[in-house]
Amino acid sequence: MEVRLMEPMCRHTSFRTGGPADWFVIPDTPEELAAALAVCKKTDTPWYILGNGTNLLVGDKGIRGAVFSMERFDRMEVSGTRIRAGAGLLLSRLANGAFKEGLSGLEFVAGIPGSVGGAAVMNAGAYGSEIKNCLVSAAALDPEGRVHTYKAEELSLGYRTSRFLTSGEIVLEAEFSLERGKKEEIQAKMEELSRKRREKQPLEYPSAGSTFKRPEGYFAGQLIEEAGLKGFSVGGASVSEKHAGFVINRERATSADILSLCREVQARVDGRFGVKLELEVRLLGEF
């Protein structure tokens, strides 16, 4: 496997920020991953799993310990209306692979800048659809190096959550059940969703997508906009003027800029509306 020392995490996050990881490990197989985890356990080295880095804010001081990249777990196999995909496969490639096979059900993930593993962990969703709607099962490596396969109903899939957030297991692959469809209709739906994203989301700037979870009974972006925070900035970080639910790296922002901005947005929305916004973005490392 490949091991890098003091790897800048700004190269691996969609915010394009973050200090270095002590160890950056890229295993090729579950066996290599399990062996590396055993070394971490033996040496009391903290470790973290990296998908595509699209829902992550890494501190400017970096990460003490090892970061495991799942980028080489990117195989995809099609059998009838089922697709089995590795945790490191990008969702855009998964959606395009389904389209090429004339399989419908994953159009909504085409524009989500994440990986299969991250989507399973967070039950990724967009435009009224969620991963749990087509997920059949997922295989994961436990902290002891054993592989388990779980049915979808065993994964406690909810709004941006699953059992993997607390179990300490690492998703290796996932299997999806889809439906036969007409290629032209699948393509048209993917293009329509892509158009909506371009129109409504600040794709021209580094960000982590929707920064805050949807509070029950509200929309985070609407609350932020009504609080007068569109365009509000801290350092190089800003609340997007196109969509207030997005915090963007407008101009060489640091992770501290982004986090300070998020905290100020949370405080102002709470003070104005009594609603506590919860970060959807995961914080990692030393700030």
Image (cartoon, rainbow, N blue to C red):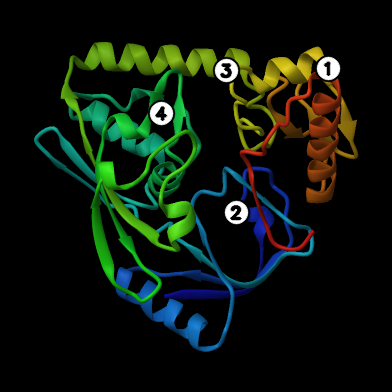
In the image, what residue type sits under mark 3? Arg
Measure the C-alpha gap from mark 4 to mark 2: 20 Å
Q: Are marks 2 and 1 in contact (CB under 8 Å)?
A: no
Q: Secondary structure at mark 4?
A: loop
Place of residue 54 in the rendered image (x, y in percent of width and height, measured from the top left): 57, 43
Mark 4 or mark 2: whose residue is earlier in sequence: 2
Mark 2 or mark 1: whose residue is earlier in sequence: 2
Q: Provide the residue designation for mark 3.
A: 198
| Tag in front: 2 or 1 | 1
Query: Is the residue marked by circle 3 packed among few (<14), some (14-19), or many (20+) residues within 10 Å?
Result: few
Q: Provide the residue designation for mark 2.
A: 12
In the image, what residue type sits under mark 4? Ala
Q: Provide the residue designation for mark 1.
A: 227
Q: Residue at x 35, y 13 (%)?
A: 189
Q: Secondary structure at mark 1?
A: loop
Total count of labels: 4
Q: Secondary structure at mark 2?
A: loop
Question: On the picture, is 267 further left or further right than 68?
Answer: right
Question: On the picture, is 23 further left or further right than 130?
Answer: right
Q: Residue at x 34, y 75 (%)?
A: 145
Measure the C-alpha gap from mark 3 to mark 4: 13 Å
